[in-house]
């Protein structure tokens, strides 16, 4: 299964996994309590001391951490090691308020590389592969994470970063890239560009590791068909470490969480109640092996499901579903919860490319949902009557999916700005009023 498959860890028994988690959780809670005054204060407000946490069964006693806490504690308030022991920072890509800054010791970097190496091997990667990394580098965790994982596996690594699509494709052809790592929206753009240049037969890609933004199963199938690859999901957050917190295997039915490093919970986002495996709710993570920036019960705001169903790949670590939306940025339109992934599913099922934009406005105190959708070149040659018919068909399909009316506008190919990083899918103009 590759050069960096660790069966003694990744296929460990549930009892062994639980033993690791119990021991590491107790150690981490003590470490945080002793070294992070901000979090110690949160614990004391709940009347909790490290002695109250003896195993994973006691995890629910600890207070949650949120992104607001990270902003309030910026920059050093949640640092659990001397700054002199830290070798790197990474930061979120947020554009409003204080950024979230995460710290890493060399030990933390080594563990992060290991987690990303597991993801590459789960996608079939070995030291014989050429791993083409066009996630952004710098403060964003995508590029450094997969770069480090590729080195750990021993693969030839192309640190391309994002942008400059001409150069991306040239290196892909000339150097024989076999594994592509980027956002799914950029993978779709690369596929489109490769086909336009007639280079599909010169591309040697066989797998892709895509993350950093939401994408649907329909988008996965579209990318796989156009690039002739198997597309794997990967999940992570800067706050927890970066990509590699969880990853898909060949079964493609969810992402295995690296449970020797992270404990996952699903909670009711309204009440904070811990939910059993199999129920949909908000994902919460606790780091149990990090030194510099270990977060306890961090609320990701991602909505998903955990499953311990036996996996054909042999890995025993719990799986999380692809995030189904977010508890904090889902669109509430006329009282209805709307997730962009629902709209994407309708569009791709109807044969439209994965280039669309959702615009929400408020007119006369009423919400208005508009969906701008690019046509394929073939559709663009239709008559005005045919285009109008297509728009009505989409209006009806979206009404059936969402339960509310959406105003659909089909636009010419290449009209919607392409993304070389995270795609901007939603423009909510209500926030400007």
Image (cartoon, helix red, strand yellow):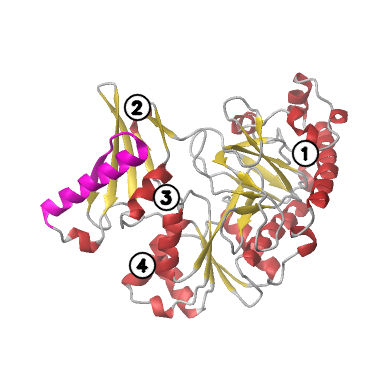
- The residue under label 3 is 423
- 23 or 11: which is nearer to us? 11
Contact (Cβ within 8 Å) of mark 1 with mark 2: no
Count of number-bearing discs = 4
Q: Which mark is residue 193?
A: 4
Q: Is residue 227 among what the camera can see?
A: yes
Q: Specify whether residue 180 is painted magenta.
A: no
Distance Cα–Cα, label 4 vs label 2: 38 Å
Distance Cα–Cα, label 1 vs label 2: 44 Å
Contact (Cβ within 8 Å) of mark 1 with mark 3: no
Q: Earlier in the sequence, mark 4 or mark 2?
A: 4
Q: Which mark is residue 334?
A: 2
* Mark 4 neighbour density, 10 Å: few (under 14) some (14–19) many (20 or more): some
* Mark 3 neighbour density, 10 Å: few (under 14) some (14–19) many (20 or more): some
Q: Give the vertical position of 418 relative to 191 (above or below).
A: above
Tag 1 secondary structure = loop
Q: Which mark is residue 80?
A: 1
Q: Specify whether residue 384 is painted magenta.
A: yes
Residue 325, horizontal then vertical, whole percent: 49, 41
Q: Is residue 187 among what the camera can see?
A: no
Residue 154, horizontal then vertical, whole percent: 68, 72
Tag 4 secondary structure = helix
Q: Nearer the viewer, mark 2 or mark 3?
A: 2
- Magenta part of the chain: 383-409
Q: Residue at x 60, y 66 (%)?
A: 123
Predominant SS of the magenta segment: helix
Q: Earlier in the sequence, mark 4 or mark 3?
A: 4
Q: In the rendered image, which quarter contains the C terminus?
A: top left
Residue 171, horizontal then vertical, whole percent: 48, 74
Distance Cα–Cα, label 2 vs label 3: 25 Å
Contact (Cβ within 8 Å) of mark 4 with mark 2: no
């Amino acid at each position: 299964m590759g050069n960096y498959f660790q069966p003694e860890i990744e296929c460990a028994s549930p009892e062994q996994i639980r033993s690791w988690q119990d021991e590491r959780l107790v150690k981490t809670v003590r470490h945080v309590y002793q070294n992070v005054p901000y979090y110690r204060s949160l614990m004391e407000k709940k009347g909790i001391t490290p002695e109250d946490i003896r195993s994973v069964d006691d995890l629910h006693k600890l207070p949650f951490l949120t992104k607001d806490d990270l902003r309030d504690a910026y920059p050093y308030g949640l640092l659990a090691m001397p700054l002199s022991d830290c070798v790197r920072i990474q930061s979120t890509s947020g554009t409003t308020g204080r950024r979230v800054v995460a710290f890493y010791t060399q030990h933390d970097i080594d563990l992060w590389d290991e987690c990303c190496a597991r993801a590459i091997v789960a996608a079939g990667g070995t030291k014989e592969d050429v791993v083409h990394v066009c996630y952004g580098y710098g403060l964003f965790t995508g590029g450094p994470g997969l770069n480090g994982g590729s080195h750990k596996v021993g693969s030839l690594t192309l640190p391309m970063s994002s942008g400059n699509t001409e150069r991306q494709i040239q290196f892909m052809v000339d150097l024989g890239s076999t594994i592509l790592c980027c956002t799914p929206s950029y993978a779709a753009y690369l596929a489109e560009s490769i086909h336009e240049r007639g280079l599909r037969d010169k591309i040697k890609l066989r797998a892709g590791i895509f993350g950093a933004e939401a994408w649907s199963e329909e988008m996965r199938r579209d990318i796989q068909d156009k690039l002739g690859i198997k597309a794997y999901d990967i999940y992570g957050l800067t706050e927890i470490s970066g990509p590699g917190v969880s990853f898909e295997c060949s079964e493609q039915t969810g992402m295995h969480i690296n449970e020797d490093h992270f404990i996952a919970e699903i909670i009711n986002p309204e009440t904070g109640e811990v939910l059993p495996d199999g129920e949909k709710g908000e994902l919460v993570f606790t780091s149990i092996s990090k030194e510099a920036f270990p977060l306890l019960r961090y609320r990701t705001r991602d909505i998903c499901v955990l499953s311990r169903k036996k996996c054909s790949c042999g890995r025993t670590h719990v799986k999380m579903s692809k995030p189904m939306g977010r508890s904090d940025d889902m669109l509430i339109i006329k009282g209805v919860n709307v997730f962009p992934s629902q709209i994407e599913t309708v569009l791709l099922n109807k044969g439209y490319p994965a280039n669309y934009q959702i615009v929400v406005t408020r007119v006369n105190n009423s919400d208005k949902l508009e969906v701008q959708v690019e046509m394929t070149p073939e559709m663009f040659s239709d008559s005005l009557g045919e285009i109008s018919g297509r728009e009505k068909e989409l209006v009806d399909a979206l009404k059936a999916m969402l339960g509310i009316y959406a105003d659909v506008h089909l636009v010419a190919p290449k009209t919607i700005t392409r993304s070389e990083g995270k795609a901007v899918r939603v423009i909510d103009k209500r926030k400007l009023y």
